[in-house]
Every structure is written in structure tokens, then in C-alpha cells.
Amino acid sequence: MMNQTESLPTRVRAARDAIEYNVPTGLAAPIVGIVLGTGMGSVTSLISDPVRVPYSEIPFFQTSTVEGHAGELVFGRIDSVPIVALNGRCHFYEGYSTDEICFPIEVLCSFQIASLIIGNASGGINPKFKSGEVMLLDDHIDLFFRTKLEPEVRDGLIAGDTGQTVEWSLFKQAAYSHRLNQWAACLADENNLVLHRGVYAALTGPNYETRSEYRFLKRIGADVVGMSTIPEANVAVKNGVEVCGLSTITNVANPDVRHTTSHTEVIAAVAIAEKTLLKIVSGLVGRHRVGDGW
Ligand code: HPA
């Protein structure tokens, strides 16, 4: 019986074995991975011939306790490009470690995906942003302070006996792909869609921020704030995968207005954002067709 103390490659192998057992060979070579954030469940409607594998059948996958987060991997095709989607993610505020949160990303990367599209929900801090709009992540501010280190690197650093110099700059590289962002911006232009670009800040949650915290986030340069994505984006970049982040603004985080966001408002915002998300995700995936400039 394996447990969490097994090495990362061993755990990834075990998860892949369980997945490959359930997925036909033709689909088990995805080119694009997609993390379906809050309200992105409708992206599954784009997937042809879907094959679903519940997280409960995959070793070391955890199940989210958050409403609206299904727990399944979906393999299939969008616009004839093989993809794999994580339908449902776990959050730090649910009590999971960053290791557990990022494990599914390690597994997706082990399939040699070229790109990862990560969706999330956020509060809009930039006064020009409205709820129901979507922002492309140009950069992020990591207020999690918990970037995941490989145990080998961490242990080596602590023990100080590896004799190797650690390339710290590796952990500081830009997380979001210039190329994918250019494609997404063009798609928005061509389809007359509002697609903001800006900086995503992430805190661990679970609560939304106080007005003073929103004011602070605005002053340090954040355009939106959420509670996910950064650990996952870092892991994908570490694995050499290009990342595109799409944030659905579900509430306007205006520090000067006393307002509590209701669930109804969030649902309404998600419904407005759906059209933009479906166009951008399908367009981005379509650009990965062999022979289409890819
Ligand atoms: N803060 C943090 N996370 C969020 C918010 C917010 O205002 N809205 C949606 N996710």
C-alpha cells in the first residue's frame, strides 16, 4: 500500500497507471491541459468523445469539498486536438497542502502536454473591471508564500550537503506564456470580446478580503485577487509547460464601498463570462492543431 511519503515520480507513476487503465490509447496523449476553475464547468461541453476518470479512482488525487467543483479528469478532443481537463480542483483553504494541490498538475505534465490553461475566479480590484469580465494573467503576486520545492532540493538545502549550487532564479521566472497570451488577445479582438490583461494576486483564503486588504492589494499593483492558480502555474512552468491563466471576475472588490458579495451575484457573473471563456479556450486549444502555426 503506497502512501504520501513515496517519492513524487513513484506517486505520479501510480496515478498514471490508474488513468491509462481507463483511457483509450488514442486519447492518452493530450497536448493541452485545462484546469476548470469556478464557473468553467461548461467548457466540458466543448469536449468531444469525453472519457471521464473520477479523482476517487486515481491514487493521490484529493476531492474538493467546494460546491461546484466536480472531481474528475476528462480526456477528449476540442477542435480535434487531444486535451485533458481537471474538472474540479482542491484549494489550500480546504486544508490541503500545496503538494496535494499541485499533484494533479504534476500528473498532467507527465503526459508531456505542451500548454496548460488555468482558470480561476477572482475579485476585481482595478476600478475599470466589472464583474462577469475576464482577465488574462500577465503576471502574479504570490501572497501564498508557499512555492512548492522538490523534496530533493529542499532536503539538500537544509542538509547543506549536496555540494551543488541551487539555481534559485529558476523559481522566479515569468509564469505566463507570452505566446499563449498573444493568441488569446487576438482571439478576443477577432470576436469583439472584452479580455483584460493584468496582475493576479493570490492569498490563501478562505475569506474574501477586508476593505483595507483590497486597498493594500491595489497599492501593490494587483488588478484582481483570488485563492488559487499560483502554486499550479509554478509547477507547470517548472515542468517546461507553457501556461495561460484566465480569471473570471465574480465581484468588484472596491475598498470604498461597503458591500457583501452574494452567491447570486457570483452565479450571474459566471454566466456572463461563459461566452468569453468558451471562445478563448476553444480558440487557444485549436491553435495547437498540427500544421496551424504550432
Ligand atoms: N477575493 C478572493 N478570492 C476571490 C474573490 C475575492 O474578492 N472573488 C472570487 N474569488
Image (tube, rainbow, N blue to C red):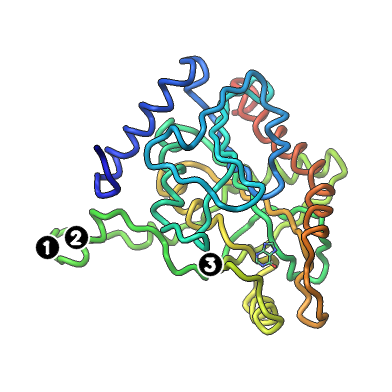
The mark nearer the N terminus, 3 or 2, is 2
Quadrant that contains the C terminus: top right
The CA distance from mark 3 to mark 2 is 27 Å
Three-letter residue code for mark 3: Thr
Q: Are marks 1 and 2 in contact (CB under 8 Å)?
A: yes
Which residue is depicted at the point 71% across and 32% down? 282
| Residue 156: image tag | 2
Q: Residues within 10 Å of mark 1 (few under 14, many from 20)?
A: few
Say above or below: 44 vs 70.
Answer: above
- Say left or right for 274 vs 241: right
Secondary structure, mark 2, is helix
Which residue is depicted at the point 65% across and 32% down? 285
Say above or below: 48 vs 276.
Answer: above
Which residue is depicted at the point 41% across and 58% down? 97
The CA distance from mark 1 to mark 2 is 6 Å
Residue 271 in view (yes/no): yes
Find disc 3 in the rendering and name its residue.
204
